[in-house]
Image (cartoon, rainbow, N blue to C red):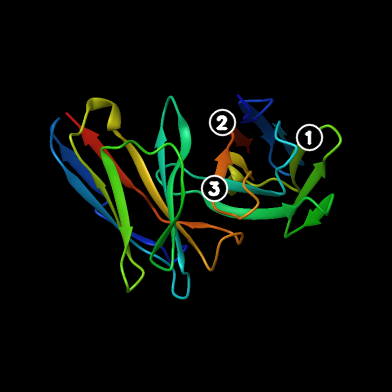
Amino acid sequence: GESVGLHLPTLSVQEGDNSIINCAYSNSASDYFIWYKQESGKGPQFIIDIRSNMDKRQGQRVTVLLNKTVKHLSLQIAATQPGDSAVYFCAENRDNAGNMLTFGGGTRLMVKP
Amino acid sequence: DSGVTQTPKHLITATGQRVTLRCSPRSGDLSVYWYQQSLDQGLQFLIQYYNGEERAKGNILERFSAQQFPDLHSELNLSSLELGDSALYFCASSVAPGYEQYFGPGTRLTVT
């Protein structure tokens, strides 16, 4: 069935480098996408979202890129810090009413000092 | 701190039992969502309420039910518990459907 997935289960980066976490989605009807960060023992924390009428959105040190042609979503973290170490999930809204988010399997980001 | 509160933080119970998980949304949020996170299934949407009414259902078992009360807090009831129900249960809230969802700290349920 259709699903949201991730290319890399674990990403290891050096402190100060930029990180890129990728996500593929398969439902072309999805129109809202969100990135969440989950630290050990905590609930998912909203990072940034993007709607399908945009291809790029920037936050503080984070940028989300949406490529609808190839159904690909990415999260870029600039100047990665040890506090960025966590599992990152992409999620898509499939029902056009914001009622149901479908989550990907997650990517673990490890930041080396 | 997201502003969403969940109780209890941990729950250990036996198979066949029934438990109730409680969630208080962020102030001003009318929509509440329940998710289950297990190692083999990841984060799965269970059910959503908006201003007291059920709005969407995901992969929620018939043994599970939920409701949202007039004060907007929500409860998730899990009955006839099985070992496979052991998981983290998260509540999230948003001001309305279609807006960003903020997650609570979760309830860790262990069924023995």
The circle drawn on residue A96 is none
The quadrant of the image that shows the C terminus of chain A is top right
Q: Are marks 1 and 3 in contact (CB under 8 Å)?
A: no
The disc, 2 or 1, on the residue closer to the chain's N-terminal end is 1
Which element is circle 1 on?
loop
Q: In the rendering, at what x and y percent does residue A111 appear? A: 62, 37
Provide the residue designation for mark 2: A105
Q: Is residue A86 at all visible to an observer of this figure? A: no
User: Of the numbered discs in the image, which one, if any, rests on residue A71?
Assistant: 1
Residue A98, picture quadrant: bottom right
Residue at (56, 31) in percent of width and height: A105
Apparent side of residue B69 relative to residue B38 in the rendered image (left or right): left
Q: CA distance from mark 3 to mark 2?
A: 16 Å
Please tell me which residue lies in front, A13 or A69. Answer: A69
For mark 3, what is the residue? A100
Q: Which residue is more in the foreground, B70 or B106? A: B70
Q: Earlier in the sequence, mark 3 or mark 2?
A: 3
Q: Secondary structure at mark 3?
A: loop
Label 2 with label 1: CB-CB less than 8 Å: no
Q: CA distance from mark 1 to mark 3?
A: 19 Å
Q: Position of residue B40 (x, y in %)?
A: 43, 24
Marked residue chain, label 2: A
| Residue appearing at x 33%, y 66% in the figure | B73
Q: Amino acid at mark 2?
A: Gly
Amino acid type at circle 3 is: Met
